[in-house]
Image: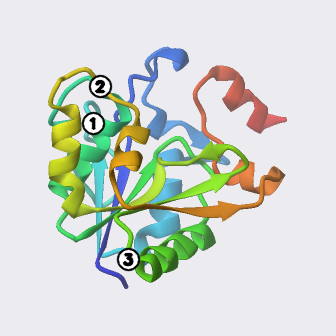
Amino acid sequence: MQQVTLAILAGGKSSRLGGIDKALIAVDGVPLINRIYNTFKNDVSEVIVISNGNNGYAIEANVFPDIIKNCGPLGGIHSALTHACNPLVFVVSVDMPFANHDVYNQLLNLYFRANAEVVVPRHGNLLEPLFGLYSKALESKVTSILSDMQGHPITDLLNAANTHYLQLPDDFQTRMWFYNINTPDDLKALEL
């Protein structure tokens, strides 16, 4: 087991889903947060959840809110880096029902091989920064980026850090690994 913290980002406003807690949406009868937890819990030494709402998740994890409010996903990453006990943080968005264990292992291998600060998957022209490895040492860099309280895209951090990309094929299977649920139609598509 690696000294890695799994940080499940569950703090989005979920406005396109009517404000419901995405973490509790069930896919194949299992809440999204449990699906991610069950996939990765044996590979990490700590699990935390970054959420500004519900604290009643049925998993063994401490729940922390954003420290710098209203800064989107980068604010969630900041809170994860601040609260993690380990030097390496595996960030996963709660709305990825098919997050892949093998891709995590590939990210981990690249992280150590490249001596990186950040490793995220890339397929085609798409980056997947909400399924990535981040060095806890980046906490002050993220704090600096967010200091203007304007909110920033995660790419601002990727561009400022020693970031490496895990190139994956741009095919149906890869897209499903990173499929995320943002709208009722995204959820409905899984029922077909």
Disc 1/disc 3 C-alpha distance (Å):
24 Å
Horizontal placement of 101 versus 116: left or right?
Answer: right
Please, what is the three-letter code of the amino acid marked with disc 2? Gly
Please name the residue that numbered disc 2 is placed on.
151
Report x, y in % for residue 54.
29, 34
Please name the residue that numbered disc 3 is placed on.
115
Labelled pair 2, 3 in contact (Cβ < 8 Å): no
Foreground disc of the pair 2, 3 = 3
Q: Is residue 185 above or below residue 165?
A: above
Foreground disc of the pair 1, 2 = 2
Q: Going from the N terminus, do you reach mark 1 or mark 2 first?
A: 1
Labelled pair 1, 3 in contact (Cβ < 8 Å): no
Please, what is the three-letter code of the amino acid marked with disc 3? Asn
Q: Secondary structure at mark 3?
A: loop
Horizontal placement of 158 versus 169: left or right?
Answer: left
Report x, y in % for residue 150.
25, 20
